[in-house]
Amino acid sequence: MKISPIAIQNIASISALGSNDAEIIQNYRNLKPLFVKQTKGLEEIWVSKLTEAIQKEIFQLRKENNKYRDLDASVLYAMLVGRNCLNKTNWDTSIPIGLNLGSSRGATQQLEEHYQHFLTHQQAKTLASPSTTLGNISSWVAHDLQLNGPEFSHSITCSTGLHALLNGIAWLQAGICDRFMVGGTEAALTDFSIAQMQAMKIYSSELDAYPCKALQTNKTKNTMVLGEGAVMVALDKNCDDKKVKITGIGFATEALTHSTSISANGTCFVKSMQMALEDIGPNDVDIVVMHAPGTIKGDLAEINAVHTVFGNQTPALTNNKWLVGHTFGASGLLSLQMACLMLQEQEFFEVPYLNSNPKPKKIQKVLVNAVGFGGNAVSVLVEI
């Protein structure tokens, strides 16, 4: 769907990649996965964690206000990127600014801790309910930033971040708001969250240099690795030549055949990419930033969809989950940030083990994909 251009004024993120553009770009260039081992029971598993510097910032954020001590990490992550994004953008908060923040899992850490307390004592703590509701993410961030526009929280599993982007664009296009902040946040490196991924037999047990083999078509095992992080994006309708612009959006949901997977041909991706491109020819897209979580079926379905849409004119394909893991609700916007950096730097951030992957001669248009459990896909076209 072609839209009136929406400017991406700024993006702020925290993840294993870091928190500032220079650090993030360098980590993309280093071509080394940012995974560490985390002990889970009697075993060690791969995870992608926030850097020590970011963890210290979160610790200080929790200390600065007594009300923040009992908030889930997902809320604090969102607060930090919200502050960073607003500071970079320098918007006047007396003017209404909309906010849509999403998370696949929500207040995972607090929920698990409160439930464990309930199992032990057969009684819930006073703050159990308000600290575990999904809505507390956007409400606390809006409070912290002193915003006075509409605010939403939502969950559409792993496509949550890009769905927040769609909602922000809709409000801007409708003329209800002139400025909108959209984001995704995830703090799901908990025992139960990881156990859920292992129960689906999709978690990586690889021991070589690339524990997550996203986009590798000949892998024989699932290799998803879980990460944590948050992203905030500042949007408005005032475009200039220096800013990356959103010029096309697509979305689709396919008929459910399984609660966690999409069809083998990636039908939802085919529809969402075709909608986002609309009048754009296949050879006009330089790069597709793939969702590709590192699972056999998920990666192959998306690759099949790309071949359906682009035929023998397939653009360069890339992905960041091999590097930073799957950050669930934040992952789509982390991919969007990757696309923006490639456009601004005019540099292709490659996947090192994809030797046959063509590199673009120019970078003018990048398509970004995300999908959630059950086949709800979003595709976003950005250009500079």
Image (spheres, rainbow, N blue to C red):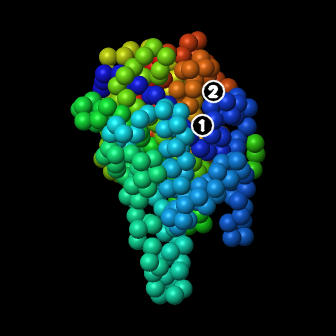
Nearest the viewer among 20 and 285 is 20
- Residue for point 49% across, 38% down: 86
For disc 2, the marked residue is: 349
Q: CA distance from mark 1 to mark 2?
A: 9 Å
Residue 320 tag number:
1
What is the three-letter code of the residue carrying label 1? Asn
Determine whether the residue tagged by mark 1 lies in a helix, strand or loop: loop
The quarter of the image holding the N terminus is: top left
Residue furthest toward the front? 94
Tags 1 and 2 in contact by the CB under 8 Å rule?
yes
Query: 162 above or below 204?
Result: above
Q: How far from the left and from the top, in percent, is residue 33?
A: 70, 41
Q: Residue at x 57, y 26 (%)?
A: 341
9 in relation to 64, above or below: above
- As drawn, the residue found furthest toward the bottom would be 121
Question: In the drawing, does residue 288 fall left or right of residue 220?
Answer: left
* Kind of residue at disc 2: Phe
- Percent position (x, y) of residue 226? 59, 52
Q: Residue 336 appears at what percent x and percent y?
A: 50, 33
Residue for point 39% across, 55% down? 139
Q: Look at the picture and state if 144 lies above or below 301.
A: below
Mark sitting on residue 270: none
Q: Secondary structure at mark 2?
A: loop
Identify the residue at image location x=57%, y=23%. 342
